[in-house]
Amino acid sequence: MSALLYRLAEESDIPAMARIRVADWGIEELWRVRISRYLNYEHHPRQALAPRVGYVAVDVDHDAVVGFIAGHLTRRHGCEGELQWINVIPERRGTGVAAELLRVLAAWFVAQNATRICVDVEPENTPARRFYLRHGANDLNPSWLVWDDIRVVLAEPNPPQNPK
């Protein structure tokens, strides 16, 4: 597999982010608008605070976005930050891309002095719930998981980027 670069999301990345999000959820144009409005502080999730951030994973050989993550500061559910979205193209799932995106966002939260981080996950979304639990989150309520200290993600060993 090609090498990946993890960097801040740019306006030009939004169409690719929307295409990735649509693979699992909804209509591309809706996501293009929603992601753009979120990153431009025009869409405000409940109890969201500034700042907020988005990161992308870019396949450097093909100059293609293969995954993204976004999050913001909050006071929702007694948390200091909220993971808003994380999505990876199907071909790159299980290769460590999501784990590295989570690590990048965790470092951003820590730099913002936010360590208690929550994420909204549908109870039926077993793969997502497993992913978050495997990376140190715990149940908060039926629809939310929480990291009492997101630094646990930063302490994890790096996953292999090219598993067999």
Image (cartoon, rainbow, N blue to C red):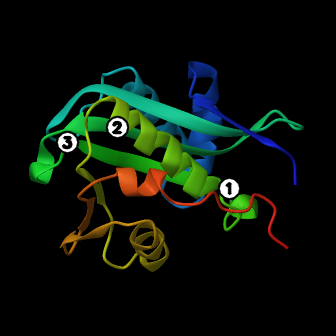
Residue 81 vs residue 126, the one in the foreground: 81
Q: Is residue 3 left or right of residue 98?
A: right
Amino acid at the residue labelled 2: Val
Residue 159 vs residue 93, the one in the foreground: 159
Residue 135's spot in the image, x, y percent?
45, 66
Mark 3 closeness class: few <14, some 14–19, many ≥20 residues within 10 Å: many
In contact (CB < 8 Å): disc 3 and disc 2:
no
Residue assigned mark 1: 89
Q: Which label was assigned to residue 98?
A: none
Query: Which of the image's four quarters has the N terminus?
Result: bottom right
Say what secondary structure mark 1 lies in. Answer: loop
Q: At x 44% / y 39%, what residue is drawn?
A: 107
Q: Which label was assigned to residue 110?
A: 2
How far apart marks 3 and 2 lie (CA) works out to: 10 Å
How far apart marks 2 and 1 lie (CA) works out to: 27 Å
Query: Which of the image's four quarters has the C terminus?
Result: bottom right
Residue 63's spot in the image, x, y percent?
82, 33
In the image, is residue 67 above or below residue 48? below
Residue 1 vs residue 86, the one in the foreground: 1
Q: Is residue 71 left or right of residue 131?
A: left
**Earlier along the polypeptide chain: callout 2 or callout 1?**
1
Residue 23's spot in the image, x, y percent?
60, 58
Q: Which label was assigned to residue 80?
A: 3
How far apart marks 1 and 3 lie (CA) works out to: 28 Å
Q: From the image, state whether disc 2 or disc 1 is nearer to you.
A: 2
**Earlier along the polypeptide chain: callout 1 or callout 3?**
3
Q: Is residue 52 left or right of residue 73?
A: right
Residue 41 shows in this picture: yes
Amino acid at the residue labelled 3: Glu
Q: At x 38% / y 66%, what residue is drawn?
A: 136
Mark 2 closeness class: few <14, some 14–19, many ≥20 residues within 10 Å: some
